[in-house]
Image (tube, rainbow, N blue to C red):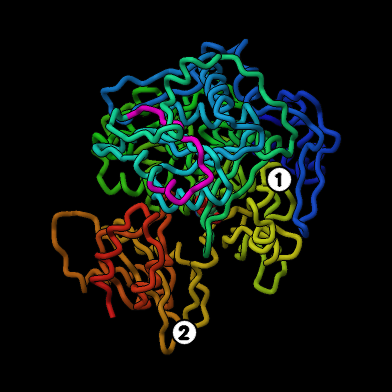
Amino acid sequence: MSNYHIKHLEEYFQVYRKSVENPEKFWEEIAEEHFLWRKKWDNVLSWDFTKPEVKWFEGAKLNITENCIDRHLLTRGDKTAILFEPNNIKEEAQHITYKQLHQNVCKMANVLKSKGVQKGDRVCVYLPMIPELVYTVLACARIGAVHSVVFAGFSSTALATRINDCDCKIVITSDGSFRGKKTIDLKGIVDESLESCEGVKTVLVAKRIQSEITMKQDRDFWLQPLLEEASSECEPEIMDAEDPLFILYTSGSTGMPKGMLHTTAGYMVYASYTFKNVFNYTENDVYWCSADVGWITGHSYIIYGPLANGATSVLFEGVPSYPDFGRFWQTVEKHKITQFYTAPTAIRALAKEGVDYVKNYDLSSLKVLGTVGEPINEEAWHWYDDNVGKNQAPIVDTWFQTENGGIMITPIPYVTPTKPTYATLPFIGIQPALMNEEGKEIEGNQVSGRLCIKFPWPSIARTIWGNHKRYKETYFSAFENKYFTGDEALRDEVGYYRITGRVDDVIIVSGHNLGTAPIEDAINEHPAVAESAIVGFPHEIKGNALYGYVILKDTGESRNQDNLRKEINQIITEQIGPIAKLDKIQFTEGLPKTRSGKIMRRILRKIANNEADNLGDISTLLNPEVVEGIIKKVLN
Ligand code: WT7
């Protein structure tokens, strides 16, 4: 039996037991058998959640790019590593082989070196989803520089904050990016942010949209000519297991974004092992994760996890709605995609457009479907299962966080029986606990509580860049000796987990704890409803009452809104109970969302609480323009 690829449920339980009974021995075997080390570790694990401090594979030496690229050259040199699918359907897809990836990463590494980048330096990467993005990320890892990828949809203010926080001296960007029919002036955004980033001395600019831009003398350089000149050989920097690999920012409930720091060996082992099992990866697959590399999902499941396994990973530049709402499915057919991994919000948006966009494509190559980033509601789950997977391809609802580095709770496809809206079982090595408000662990099944993790896993973030105190306070102070996720979950009668939402989304109505997710699920079952979000607002008698924002499907017929309100509350009453009925229901065209697709309940809460004049910075939202419309129609 190879512990590396789990094939049956009994095997899952067996391997899981091993992984928690003797984690050191378990991870040592995985690390030993499946990776390339320049030197093995002296110690597998040392940890102390009170400091907090975690070290995996201490004393080991390696370079992650040797594991993701070089070691495949002999057996997979001509295999496609990155399959680039451009925004414009008329532009040809690019099949970048492992050999070509090696050359380009080495060239890029040499360019970075020629601009003075050294081991340990932070490099800000602000690029669209083009091959240069992958080259840059891996080139940093090749020379031991720490990449900080900032999603190229963030505003200049958000970019500047992130550049300054970790003191980047160089930014890699492009003249602009394509997004459906639009182009975005990335270089202009960078110029604007650099007005407040004195530390940045160099900007490398990839040409993508051929726009006219201004280049600042001695600071800005076109990337392509430098790449052409650069040598395609670059010896990898030999790194310590615990050397920083990257920083990735994630927003907290308050204050500055948190620069989560991930280190080298543990991250590599966990991203790779989860990829293999969660996507049932086999050699000839064509795997597609539609996330942006600017998120942890992109880091772990577009770049590092797939490449460590020698896989073909699709890099998609476009958007799901361009040239029309069939783009995902057309692309699945075109490249015979075997695994497709996306966000519930994308599924809901596409479901709203109807099945006509799906049904004419041949999706029979698909063997695994995945979702990530937020709870998936039952209706969206079934739509995905029926129309995309045709009830043949298992759906893995994968739960994890930027802080976790890799997937933590998930079904293993063809192994774990799935259950809609449930992320099901902990992945190998993950020891979850549900905690009550008094800080005690809740044992047994059919319970819910705050989700913690009791034991370190290899890819846990090691700190918040420059602020270890905040790291400790945020994740290790709520519950003694446990990592607190900030999420609430329930465990059903067989031990399956359902992540019900952030703890700060809990609303206490008349002394009852109500999670937003199940109520929204109920509302969304109304045939006229496309999407909804609920928040609490102060109520004289109940303490809090519920305020619902509801997007209606565009059915073309106009409906009586008062009747709709009654029907929605009827469904809630049926599914949860009268306690969960909404006091106010506002019909709206859109909901404010983060770039990763999460509904910003904080903003909706303020609007419902008549605090719309105090919303804070909304410029980093995906759709700041919807906020104005919501405020105008707020119900008092
Ligand atoms: C938060 C982490 C992990 C990649 C993208 C998001 C929520 C994530 C699920 C899921 C329910 C989920 C949690 C978590 N979340 N996956 N499958 N079911 N909720 O990373 O931006 O760090 O957000 O996303 O609330 O804490 P992130």
Q: Residue under circle 1?
A: 457
Image location (x, y in percent) of residue 37: 75, 25
Q: Which quarter shows the N terminus?
A: top right
Tell me, yes or no, whether the highlighted magenta stretch contains residue 558. Answer: no
Dot 1 or dot 2, earlier in sequence: 1
| Relative to 38, 388 lies left or right | left
Q: Residue under circle 2?
A: 543
Q: Residue at x 60, y 48 (%)?
A: 409
Q: Which stretch appears magenta?
A: 192-208
| Relative to 406, 326 lies left or right | left
Residue type, mark 2 in image: Gly
Residue type, mark 1 in image: Trp
Q: Residue furthest bottom?
A: 541
Q: Residue at x 51, y 38 (%)?
A: 201
Q: Residue at x 76, y 48 (%)?
A: 54
Q: CA distance from mark 1 to mark 2?
A: 40 Å
> Is the residue under label 2 in contact with that under label 1 (CB below 8 Å)?
no
Q: Which quarter shows the C terminus?
A: bottom left
Q: Which quarter of the picture shows residue 534?
A: bottom left
Is the C-beta of the residue carrying label 2 under 8 Å from the nearest atom of ligand 1? no
Image location (x, y in percent) of residue 6: 65, 32
Q: How many marks?
A: 2
Image location (x, y in percent) of residue 389: 40, 36
Query: Quick one: SS at disc 1?
Result: loop
- The answer to whether any part of residue 611 appears in the image is yes
* The label number, if any, that marks residue 526 in the structure image: none
Q: Residue at x 86, y 34 (%)?
A: 42
Vertical order, 602 against 97 (above or below): below
Q: Residue furthest front?
A: 217
